[in-house]
């Protein structure tokens, strides 16, 4: 009996160059030359004459039983070129392929047959054979081609040991392409390309699904369990993978980081190390990625609620999010009283560890608030977040020229710079108060101790 992995996998068999058939059937070649598609005259398992290692490759979710495409070699290579160009656009680069991908169309395949990717290595590099059932479900076809392209990109410097491409990257990029330009990516026989197509925004169905079902955790996304990939749940996994990739690409230089991660994959035994190295400007640990992912899910599912808050309410909630709650001790005979202090006091007077924790909580509150705020105040909120994060980074890394070997000077410099930035932002926010709220309120308490 097949295991759940075998049943859901697009198999990648890694082997040395094997025997080739004496005469190949007529083939269609893509414009770039990377893809060659053909319909073999004989049946049989791909790579039957080639030694393989039996190592499974990237997972493929259960295909839906509708909208299947009958594959034609000439149209298939055109579709693959469209997918290739869409992938390069997502990663923000144009590069020259090195490994050829040969596509074998199997009209005689069993109804439940999944695509099979075979990697063949020789001293010149890797080449690939992708066997596709025909007809095939569009989602499965896009995922299989994206999988092959990512493997080809990652293995350019891999040597004989194939790189590990994470499944969330394959599923996320595939779902993103499918939502962006489904009809333009895949060409069907006797079809025409419509110039004036009108479709819903790409993220609307995604947001609707993630409001009905709780998004998967970072752990579930990266190491999917059988239940997460079972029939009926694959849409949730694809939605989460698509959102994860979308949010990574929205980071500053996100596409460059993602492309760098793919290049780094052959150098490490697991993709997590490659990920952290490529995204080091954004995440120090996988725990940071988990927190970021949780906030990204909240922000995305509430993204169209911004109009619920008036400008006045937005200003007041921004003030509340910036205030740090503390307990003030007026005397030894009285219980501490709750109060709020500004960020500058936390930065200047607290020890680095509790200050860092408090400031991290402030950035999380601001991130949760942003989708609901009036758009007029969102840029100001973003500048507050940037100022706090800059202080946290500068106070921890010690990378300022001339200060790297003096932690005390480094912290003092970071404190001065952060307070200067925050004072300027407070002045901007105060100038908006009369427009949105009215007269200023009472002054806040200071000289406080951190709240427990």
Image (tube, grey):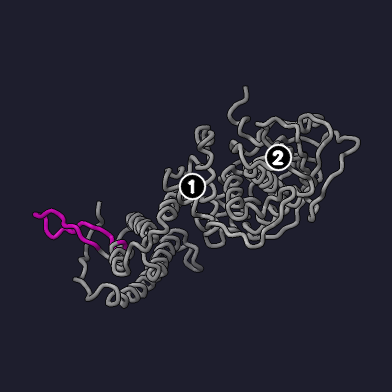
The residue sitting at 63% across, 52% down in the picture is 182
Q: Answer above or below: position of 150 versus 409.
A: above
Q: List the residue tagged with mark 2.
A: 161
Is 156 left or right of 435, judged from the image as shown?
Answer: right
The residue lying furthest to the top in this view is 1
Q: Is residue 319 left or right of residue 253?
A: left
Magenta region: which residues?
321-340
Tag 1 residue: 286
Is residue 86 on the magenta stretch?
no
Viewer-proximal residue among 272 and 246: 246
Near mark 2 (Cα within 10 A), the count class, few <14, some 14-19 or many ≥20, is few
Disc number for residue 308: none
Q: Is residue 374 above or below residue 153?
A: below
Where residue 39 appears, as percent x and y from the top left, is 81, 39
Q: Is 306 drawn above or below residue 111 in the view shown?
A: below
Residue 348 appears left or right of 154: left
Crowd tier of the residue under label 1, counting other residues whose Cα lies within 10 Å: few below 14, some 14–19, many 20 or above: some
Is 143 or 269 nearer to us in this picture?
A: 143
The image shows a total of numbered marks equal to 2
């Amino acid at each position: 009996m097949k295991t759940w992995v075998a049943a859901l996998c697009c198999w990648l068999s890694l082997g040395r160059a094997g025997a080739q058939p004496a005469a190949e059937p007529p083939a269609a070649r893509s414009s770039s030359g990377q893809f060659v598609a053909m319909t073999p005259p004989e049946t049989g398992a791909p790579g039957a004459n080639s030694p393989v290692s039996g190592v499974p490759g990237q997972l493929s979710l259960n295909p839906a039983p509708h909208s299947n495409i009958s594959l034609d070699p000439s149209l298939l290579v055109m579709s693959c070129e469209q997918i290739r160009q869409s992938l390069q656009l997502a990663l923000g680069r144009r590069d020259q392929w090195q490994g050829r991908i040969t596509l074998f169309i199997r009209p005689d395949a069993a109804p439940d047959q999944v695509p099979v990717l075979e990697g063949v290595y020789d001293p010149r590099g890797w080449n690939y054979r992708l066997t596709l059932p025909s007809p095939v479900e569009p989602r499965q076809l896009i995922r299989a081609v994206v999988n092959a392209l990512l493997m080809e990109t990652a293995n350019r410097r891999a040597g004989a040991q194939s790189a590990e491409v994470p499944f969330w990257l394959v599923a996320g990029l595939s779902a993103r392409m499918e939502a962006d330009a489904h009809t333009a990516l895949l060409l069907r026989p006797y079809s025409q390309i419509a110039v004036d197509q009108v479709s819903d925004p790409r993220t609307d169905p995604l947001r609707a699904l993630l409001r009905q079902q709780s998004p998967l955790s970072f752990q579930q996304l990266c190491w999917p369990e059988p239940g997460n990939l079972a029939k009926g749940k694959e849409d949730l996994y694809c939605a989460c993978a698509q959102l994860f990739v979308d949010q990574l690409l929205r980071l500053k230089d996100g596409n460059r980081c993602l492309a760098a991660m793919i290049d780094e994959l052959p150098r490490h035994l697991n993709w997590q190390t490659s990920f952290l190295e490529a995204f080091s400007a954004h995440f120090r640990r996988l725990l940071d990625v988990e927190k970021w992912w949780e906030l990204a899910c909240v922000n995305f599912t509430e993204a169209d609620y911004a109009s619920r808050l008036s400008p006045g309410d937005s200003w007041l909630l921004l003030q509340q999010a910036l205030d740090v709650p503390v307990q003030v001790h007026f005397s030894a005979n009285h219980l501490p009283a709750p109060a709020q202090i500004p960020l500058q006091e936390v930065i200047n007077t607290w020890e680095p560890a509790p200050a860092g924790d408090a400031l991290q909580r402030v950035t999380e509150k601001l991130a949760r608030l942003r989708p609901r705020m009036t758009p007029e105040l969102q840029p100001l909120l973003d500048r507050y977040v940037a100022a706090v994060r800059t202080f946290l980074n500068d106070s921890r890394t010690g990378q300022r020229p001339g200060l790297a070997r003096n932690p005390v000077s480094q912290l003092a410099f970071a404190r001065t710079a952060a307070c200067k930035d925050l004072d300027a932002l407070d002045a901007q926010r105060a100038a908006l108060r009369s427009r949105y709220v009215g007269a200023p309120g009472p002054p806040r308490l200071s000289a406080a101790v951190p709240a427990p």
